[in-house]
Amino acid sequence: MLTDQEIALARASMEFALAHGAQKARVTLNKSLMELFGMLNGELDKVTHALDRSLQVALFVDGRFGSFSSNRLEEEGLKAFLLDAIETVRTLQPDPARDLPDPDRMARDAQTGRELGLYDPAYEELTSDKRRELALGTAVWNRKAELEKGFTLISEEGEYSDSLFDSVVMDSNGLFARHTETSFEIGYEVTVEDSDGNRYASYWWDATPRLKDILPSLKTCSETAVRRAAAQIGPMDHPGGKCNIVVDSECASKFLTPVLNALGGYAVQQKNSFLVDKAGTQVFPERLTILDCPRSPGETGSRLYDSEGVATQEFPIVDKGVITRYFINTYIAGKTGMTPTIEDATRPKVVPFGGCKTRDDLLRKMGSGIYITGFNGGNSNTSTGDFSYGIEGFAFEDGRITHPVREMLVTGNFIDLWNHLVATADDARLCMSKLIPTLAFENIDCNA
């Protein structure tokens, strides 16, 4: 946790910069602590302890701007660092678009860092012995014979970690905001081999701000990874062509992230976005609504403010197919004259629709097609929205998975893709920063 002395040092650094040539300043102080236990084939393989502190300073000097960072947090050293930084900024070209956000836009409800309930006091009770016990209890290597049916588990590599992150941002306009959270994570990668010597790999993971909520996953994570790998055995060719696709919630961000990136202020300002001049227009089908839900208590990824200290708010990014706004920070607003919003989507959520709760409901609804469980390479064009991705997954017929597929590509354009969205499940994973359920699209190009 950040101490009162560390926070006081950050404030003193800002005041020192203001007294020595900066007209405005913003200081962000971050501190993180992580304990990681790595397992390899049922045994403890590595232990990592990481403590990191850093001070980022944004300086506005004589119409010029510069951003600097240091992890040497002692008073005299910071003074010398700031004096050098101020002189460096003076050598830069003036940039009138640079400014602090309007104070009226800033977060005022993030004073303790714990307002969102993302800090778990149980973190303080964990000892090295307890962490080791938790980590070793996650492996299935020593009981792999219970799982091996038609395959052999070749390797099992996992990590258990817990961490504490504490951050304070303050500026010369009176901002003070704090964010504190704990995180407990488990992840496994495994490789299995079939009777013909073919090998298949997969993974599974989970994360949560609360220790008690990660305990069920500690018991099942590796086994889930093994089952996902074994399910790939016996892939078959698929004829491809226009087909229905169901995209698992675990990998569905591959289709949403480029849309969100295209709404970013930098991309729009540089004309490097396929959604330029689309704000306020209906681009997607009426059935599609995407909310930003940044203030969800107790959920990973929730934040009360962005990196500038601007208060977040729940709002529709896409409202019944209509793009409502772009993500415009203070700098891009100054460059373009556009109204500032926040710098990025904090916790975007695709609102479920279509009456399906689970993946299996979607498979039955779509009848036949390709169920995509992962992407392996490919690319997309940020200017046009065209994409081509390698996919892995399964064919399904009559609403049931029939066999794994291999060496297939899904191609298209993101605007066209989302206009072929038929339905979603209601199974978004809370451990992910984007709340995207399993998605179902019709008439998409899947080529062998």
Image (cartoon, rainbow, N blue to C red):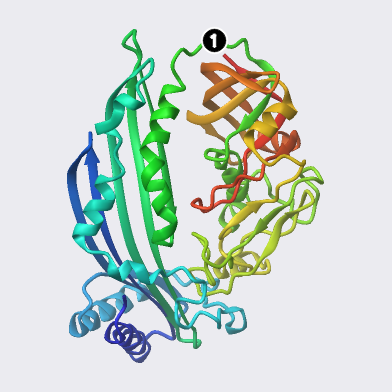
Residue 133: x percent and y percent?
A: 24, 52
Q: Please, what secondary structure does the residue beneath circle 1 have?
A: loop
Res. 285 visible in picture: yes
Residue shown at 49%/59% (left/top)? 300
Q: Position of residue 84 (x, y in %)?
A: 26, 77
* Left or right of 285, for residue 203: left
Looking at the rendered structure, the kind of residue marked 1 is Asp
Q: Is residue 255 above or below residue 110?
A: above
- Give how far across and how far down residue 401 sits, in percent: 60, 21
Residue at point 62%, 60% (across, down)? 327
The residue closer to the viewer here, 428 or 293, is 428
Q: Quadrant of the C terminus?
A: top right
* Location of residue 50 with respect to 200 vertically, above or below: below
Which residue carries the number 1 mark? 237
Q: Residue at x 38, y 18 (%)?
A: 149
Where on the picture, by quarter, is residue 129?
Answer: bottom left
